[in-house]
Image (cartoon, rainbow, N blue to C red):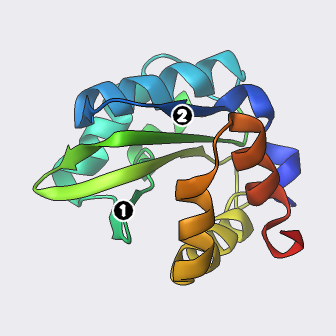
């Protein structure tokens, strides 16, 4: 499954300010609900995951998602991407990029590896930081090597 099949421009946002981790989780949930990928109960599923293990991945990235026990809240596969220019305190770690993900079956695993690859390259992360519009961010996400 390709990135452009699970993310759309309406689920890519840029915020100039900061947010709390809970606000970022709520926004990710709201965007996934709007996409028809999860029920509103997915917020608590993401909170459960954070209580078990942080979804902070390094390089200013967090990928919040639910737990295996809460799969009944997942209706489909979708991805959200929000950049918080003021940062998010993620249990003491600074996060700027929050990638909300919901996956039905194993469809999302390839997308996760694409995101991990993208964030393993400092030059690619710098492009994501420099993007001025959601449209620019979206194009970097769906075709990172084309930029």
Residue, disc 2: 14
Residue 123 coordinates in the image, percent (x, y): 59, 79
Which badge, 1 or 2, comes first in the chain's sequence?
A: 2
Q: Is residue 100 left or right of residue 104?
A: left
At numbered mark 1, what does the secondary structure look like: helix, strand or loop? loop
Say if 61 sits above or below 83 in the image: below
Query: Residue at coordinates 28% horizontally, 33% vertically from top-left?
Result: 18
The residue most toward the left is 92
Say if 111 sits above or below 47 in the image: below
- Relative to the observer, which residue lies in front, 46 or 114? 114
Structural crowding at the residue carrying mark 1, measured as other residues with C-alpha within 10 Å and reported as few (<14), some (14–19) or many (≥20): some
- Give the position of the N terminus as an image quadrant: bottom right
Residue, disc 1: 60
- Relative to the observer, which residue lies in front, 91 or 94? 94
- Relative to the observer, which residue lies in front, 141 or 73? 141
Q: Is residue 7 visible?
A: no
Q: Is residue 93 left or right of residue 47?
A: left
Query: Residue at coordinates 64% horizontally, 41% vertically from top-left?
Result: 132
Residue 27 location, quadrant: top left
């Amino acid at each position: 499954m390709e990135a452009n099949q699970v993310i759309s421009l309406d689920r890519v946002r840029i915020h100039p300010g900061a947010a709390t981790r809970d606000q970022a989780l709520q926004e990710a949930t709201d965007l996934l609900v709007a996409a028809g990928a999860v029920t509103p109960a997915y917020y608590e599923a993401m909170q459960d995951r954070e209580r078990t293990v942080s979804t902070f991945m390094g390089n200013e990235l967090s990928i919040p998602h639910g737990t295996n026990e809460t799969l009944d809240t997942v209706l489909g596969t979708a991805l959200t991407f929000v950049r918080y220019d003021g940062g998010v305190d993620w249990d003491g770690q600074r996060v700027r990029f929050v990638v909300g993900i919901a996956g039905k079956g194993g469809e999302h695993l390839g997308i996760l590896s694409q995101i991990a690859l993208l964030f393993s390259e400092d030059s690619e992360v710098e492009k994501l930081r420099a993007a001025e519009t959601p449209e620019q961010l979206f194009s970097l996400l769906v075709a990172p090597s084309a930029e």
